[in-house]
Image (cartoon, grey):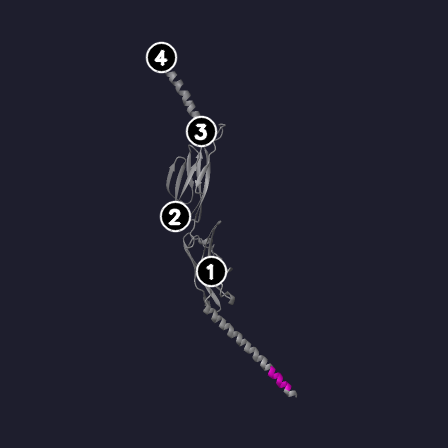
């Protein structure tokens, strides 16, 4: 009986070790490629790859991969993080209070010692709430136009343009503004109009050019006030008549002198 116990123990150990060895081999096969020397390839995706939100909003990004047993998953961003949800092969991250107009977000997944990544971009912008062109004001011989662009972001990517008919009479880029809040913009421009501009519509246009994403808004058209034009025309007519009278007087005086000289010679 005493000799049978060691023999039974050896049998049990011999049965256990081959199974343990095969389990280790199976685990190694999952972390190595077909040749046994490199990790199996896998992909990493982030969705959406591009998101446009209003400043101050939140957004969810989903990071997924084909790795069956990832060693780890992380998100790199300067934006403030919120909740995190996860499932088999994916992790969703909430980003809060997005105010920078453009932010890159990096998703990283490590599988069998190899790390791969995917990148998304989040843009925050707000198209103008309204574009309002005030009625023009005549000061002397110049018209003053004032255009209001309300609740727009980012102001630094805004271009405001005044048009008369199809012609640009003034344009200004506001790239000097670096604020991260919604803002109201007022553009004032004075110009000297001509008589044929009376029937041309005048409009104000706001354009956001966000690295290829272009957002446009425009005001209702207005025309130059007729009364102001009649006053201007009257002043021009009076000036012209006065000049003509002056010319006639000079000619008349010269003619009279000529007549007097001719009479004196006779």
Q: Mark 4 points at which residue?
A: 4
Q: Residue furthest front?
A: 199
- What distance separates the C-alpha of mark 1 from that of mark 2? 32 Å
In the image, which is nearer the foreground, mark 4 or mark 2? 2
Q: Is residue 87 above or below residue 188?
A: above
Q: Which of marks 3 and 4 is nearer the N terminus?
A: 4
In the image, which is nearer the foreground, mark 1 or mark 3? 1
For residue 258, what is the image quadrant?
bottom right
Q: Is mark 1 on a helix, strand or loop?
A: strand
Q: Is mark 2 on a helix, strand or loop?
A: strand
Q: Mark 1 points at which residue?
A: 203
Residue 114 at what x, y percent from top left? 46, 34
Q: Name the residue under label 3.
A: 30
Q: Which residue is drawn at 55% across and 78% down?
A: 246
Q: Is residue 28 above or below residue 64?
A: above
- What distance separates the C-alpha of mark 2 from that of mark 3? 42 Å
The disc placed on residue 57 is: 2
From which residue to which does the magenta span run?
Answer: 255-262
Q: Examine the structure image and report whether residue 98 is included in the region drawn in magenta.
A: no
Q: Quadrant of the N terminus?
A: top left
Q: Earlier in the sequence, mark 4 or mark 1?
A: 4
- What distance separates the C-alpha of mark 4 from that of mark 1? 105 Å
Q: Is mark 4 on a helix, strand or loop?
A: helix
In the image, which is nearer the foreground, mark 3 or mark 4? 3
In the image, which is nearer the foreground, mark 1 or mark 2? 1
């Amino acid at each position: 009986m005493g000799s049978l116990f060691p023999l039974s123990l050896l049998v049990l150990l011999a049965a256990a070790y081959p199974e343990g060895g095969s389990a280790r081999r199976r685990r190694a096969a999952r972390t190595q490629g077909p040749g046994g020397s490199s990790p199996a390839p896998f992909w990493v995706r982030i969705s959406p790859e591009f998101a446009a939100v209003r400043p101050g909003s939140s957004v969810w990004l989903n990071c997924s991969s084909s790795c069956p047993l990832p060693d780890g998953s992380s998100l790199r961003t300067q934006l403030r993080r919120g909740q995190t949800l996860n499932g088999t092969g994916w992790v969703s991250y909430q980003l809060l209070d997005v105010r920078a107009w453009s932010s890159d977000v990096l998703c990283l997944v490590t599988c069998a010692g190899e790390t791969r990544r995917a990148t998304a971009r989040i843009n925050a912008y707000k198209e103008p709430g309204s574009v309002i062109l005030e009625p023009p004001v005549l000061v002397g011989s110049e018209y003053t136009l004032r255009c209001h662009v309300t609740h727009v972001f980012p102001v630094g990517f805004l271009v405001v343009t005044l048009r008369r008919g199809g012609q640009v009479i003034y344009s200004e880029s506001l790239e000097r503004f670096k604020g991260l809040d919604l803002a109201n913009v007022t553009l004032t421009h004075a110009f000297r109009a001509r008589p044929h501009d009376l029937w041309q519509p005048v409009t104000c246009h706001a354009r956001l050019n966000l690295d290829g994403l272009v957002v446009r808004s425009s005001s209702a058209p207005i025309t130059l006030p007729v009364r102001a034009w009649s006053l201007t025309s009257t002043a021009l007519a009076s000036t012209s008549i006065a000049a003509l009278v002056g010319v006639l007087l000079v000619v008349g005086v010269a003619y009279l002198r000529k007549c007097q000289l001719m009479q004196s010679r006779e």
